Amino acid sequence: MVLHRSGIAMAWNVFQFCTALRGLGSIMLLLVLALVAVTYYVEVFECYGPTFFTATLPDSLIALAVLILFHALLVMLLWSYFTTILTDPGGVPPNWKPNSDEETGETDDLSNLMENNDSLNVGIRICRKCNQPKPPRCHHCSICGRCILKMDHHCVWVVNCVGAMNYKFFLLFLFYTFLETTLVAASLLPRFLAFFSNILGDPGTLATTFLVFVLNLAFSLSLFGFLIMHLSLVARNTSTIEAFEKKTSPRWRYDLGRWKNFEQVFGTEKLYWFIPAYSLEDLALMPSLHGLDYPTKPDSVQEF
């Protein structure tokens, strides 16, 4: 604890270990790839690959269906995962300022405005760390060292912030990972049960299959809850940070209705909903959707 001159005790700043958290992200990336590799080996080379080539017709067709679905989901999982990693979550453009209030003739006098100063009932915020204006719903990430548009959280699993520009890709990564791990757990269930009777031969293969089953089942169950939580946030047009920080009110001011809220994240083009990409039309709308042409009228946005 640190005691300031005002006599107010401030909480210990855990973000002083931001460098270590960035290093942890690299480890988590390797962990994800290792889990994918081990799962691929067991599913394709130990279980359903041999079954497809050696089993009788009904079992061979089932094995083929499992392999096709497994590879299709794996492609979408990896595509969404690396798109989330490589896509900038959305930063504030250099020298960005809110539009001036043409009705009252006010200008952007930002010198005395500080973030989180509730005594100043204004629509402009200044980041205390970046010392730059912040669009609405923008938060500073201590790990990335910059402000992120509609920041949801910093995710060590994707070695990146999750914000306005890659939130859809992150949700698709969760979705396809949930489907993939559920498929693997269901398809390996007979091998998992055989582990206890030891009727399928090689103990090493059984042990590896057992481990892959348990890991995929654990990820499937945990991702289900995580995915439901984020879908509920999308339905209300809020982020994880906002859900914890916003004041209780009858209606969230950014809630446009479930359908419009969904389109704000996934886009208006239905053909793009299930792939980690946006249409050119939706990309053109992104700046206005996330506050980059936000006017400076008082009381025009809620402070956080």
Image (cartoon, helix red, strand yellow):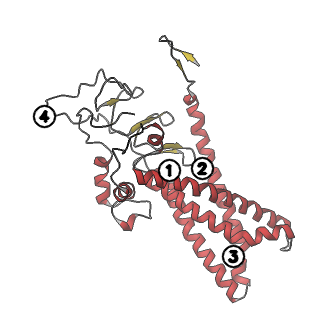
Q: Is residue 47 left or right of residue 149?
A: right
* Mark 3 crowdedness (10 Å alpha carbons): few <14, some 14-19, many ≥20: some
Q: Depth check: give the residue in front, 105 or 16.
A: 105
When asked about the image quadrant of residue 224, the answer is: bottom right
Q: Is residue 53 above or below residue 213?
A: below
Q: Is there CB contact under 8 Å for labels 2 and 4? A: no
Q: How far apart are the two marked residues, 3 and 1, measured between alpha carbons?
A: 31 Å
Residue at image coords 13%, 34%: 103
Assign a secondary structure to mark 3. Answer: helix
Q: Is there CB contact under 8 Å for labels 2 and 1? A: yes
* Mark 1 crowdedness (10 Å alpha carbons): few <14, some 14-19, many ≥20: many
Q: How far apart are the two marked residues, 2 and 3, measured between alpha carbons?
A: 27 Å
Q: Report the residue marked by disc 1.
A: 85
Along the polypeptide, which appears first: circle 2 or circle 4? 2
Residue at image coords 51%, 16%: 8
Q: Which mark is residue 103?
A: 4
Which part of the image, by quadrant, shows the C terminus?
top left
Q: How far apart are the two marked residues, 2 and 1, measured between alpha carbons?
A: 10 Å
**Residue 257 percent across, percent down from the top left:** 35, 55
When asked about the image quadrant of residue 41, the answer is: bottom right
